Image (tube, helix red, strand yellow):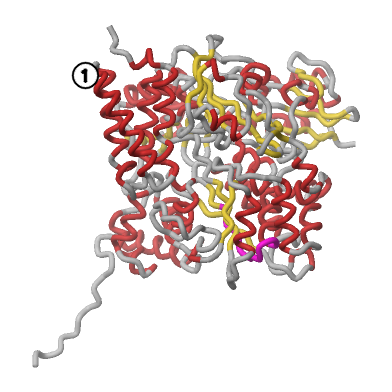
Amino acid sequence: MTTRIFVSRDATALAHGAEAVARAIGNEAKRRGVDATVVRNGSRGMFWLEPLVEIETPAGRVGYGPITVADVPALFDAGFERGHVHGLRVGPVEMIPFFERQERLTFARVGITDPLSVEDYREHHGYRGLENALAMSGEDIVKALTDSGLRGRGGAAFPAGIKWKTVLGTPSPQKYIVCNADEGDSGTFSDRMLMEGDPLCLVEGMTIAGLAVGATQGYIYLRSEYPHAYRALNAAIANAYAAGYLGADIRGSGRRFDLEVRLGAGAYICGEETSLLDSLEGKRGQVRFKPPLPAIKGLFGQPTVINNVITLASVPIILDRGAEYYKDYGVGRSRGTLPLQLAGNLKNTGLVEKAFGVTLRELLYDYGGGSYSGRPIRAVQVGGPLGAYLPESQFDTVVDYEAFAAVGAMLGHGGIVAFDDTVDMLEQARYAMEFCSIESCGKCTPCRIGLTRGVEVLDRIRAGIERDKNIVVLKDLFETMRFGSLCAMGGLTPDPVRSALEHFPEDFEVRA
Amino acid sequence: MPPKVAHEPKPIAPDLPEATATRVREVIDARRHLPGALLPVLHGIQDALGYVPEDAVPLIAHELNLSRAEVHGVISFYHHFRTHEPGRHVVRLCRAEACQALGARALEAHAKKTLGVDFHQTTKDGAITLEAVYCLGNCGCGPSVLVDPDGLHARVTPASFDALVASLREAAK
């Protein structure tokens, strides 16, 4: 029997040399006459093991990692294709504690299946949600989504069911489903991993959304910084068309749904939904006034569902297993699971999908294994460049939208970036202002001008020029931006700065 | 009444070399049917030529029935589009927080110093254009660098950056 050997094609695995490893294994197998085939899967999300090579054995998948090209002959000498012992053997992959303790619902197939194979997808519960949805009314699909308690995973956490219901209830000959795949927050990569590791899951989720609200055209707005995801999505979409899961007559139902990937062009603001819509229309990505809501007047002025990748990719399992199954996970008003991303200065970085309710400390130490540098973790930024910096005293905060809001922080898209004690928090505060001044769309004054002034004020504080007075100016600027900006970027940029000042005031003192 | 004079039609983009204009038209023709075609068109032009020449703006505007101001406004809004020919390789350095936590600031200073350029500039030998990028989605294994369209590198140190640059220069020879 042909042995299946898995080597990831995830971008992070590729950055560690997975392409060359996959090629070397294929060549070595041929040279030795070993009956094996190399499958390019997604990543399991344990980056310290990448490139991780997995062998399918009767007892499950056994892993070896991290593997370099130089290791390959020795692996064959040891008989790794039969799961035999070797110094880099990590054992059954799904029993590695980092992985075993997760609750993978949205990421159930990532790292397991061949991402581009419709057949493999179907064998692993794929398209069951769609089969169910094809037999349901739009109202019933929307109700299932509402009952599941799913909230937008892009960061704003708005109940997805309400968005869909609004689009469903707005009559129009043309409606759209738009996927926000402009994952610009530093420290986040769950959208990317899902799109590279299980793109058909997103395709299925968008198709179900189309059926639910009566939309026949979908767009995935993907950031241009994700070339590998672009390839995976286009290949998966082509395969879905070929298998009759997209197009004029989905699986003989007479229902239509078309899907196209569009590339962004390096603008952080286009992750804001109304900027994204303007960008899709071929314009500068500037924020729109709300109302009208995109659900009523969205893309090209038509009713539009616009959701993040993870939101849409969570739809298939809800339609497959039912709203109650999904809702059973989580705490309070945060239902289901959140794919959290461990990034920055941590030993074990990667993806942890957990039900809401895990603490930040567990993620940093039990999963993350503490800092990569071996020094104490001093600050953690959660929720991207607009998220607050949390000090050690807040590490027991529970992963729950409301719990994070209660400490003046934001869960956002679930990115967790750890810094050790060499971090200079005034520099981080300055960077927050600088980054947003580069990325401001320029539509409203507090953001366009305020951010540049913010950088200057922080420079004066660093230089010890009228430090106390400038702190007052800075705090005044927070107010102006928070209450005077049109969108979340202007409104939230003060958060990382304010939290740095509040929790790490010593870094804002005049240096001797 | 003044006599009628037969005018030659005024060229739309007089400063654009004919061969370039032909390629630009091909890109536009393949995409003009798309709703909101401007971004796909600009991507297509940059993929074909390496940049979007300023002299092509009037042609793009004419073909898509937009004003020159609209086209210029879109090109200048997005960091991805450049209006000057880049070096033989484009090296994008991630400046974002997760990479900072692992030494991206020092790497940035090192890269600028050793290459002798700032962001958006090309080395004197024409080998490398240095660009800033804000997140490549490799946040678990920074500092990250992207070379050309899809050459992603993880855990880049000043030493491995120098080796990378040397290999790019070697390949360009």
Residue A486 in view of the camera:
yes
Is A37 situated above or below B106? below
The correct choice, above or below, for A481 with respect to A231 in the image is above
Which one is nearer the viewer's eye here, B33 or B18? B33
| Above or below: residue A111 compared with residue A316 | above
Residue B36 in magenta? Answer: no
The quarter holding residue A454 reads top left
- Examine the image and state in which quarter residue A503 appears: top left
- Residue B49: give x, y in percent of width and height: 40, 52
Which x, y percent locates residue B47? Answer: 45, 51
Residue A37 found in image quarter: top right
Q: Which residue is mark 1?
A: A465
Q: Position of residue B77 (x, y in %)?
A: 35, 49
At mark 1, the secondary structure is loop
Q: Which amino acid lies under the numbered mark 1 shown in the image of this protein?
A: Ile
Q: Position of residue A491 (x, y in %)?
A: 41, 40
Q: Which residues are magenta?
A: A211-220
Q: Residue furthest top?
A: A512
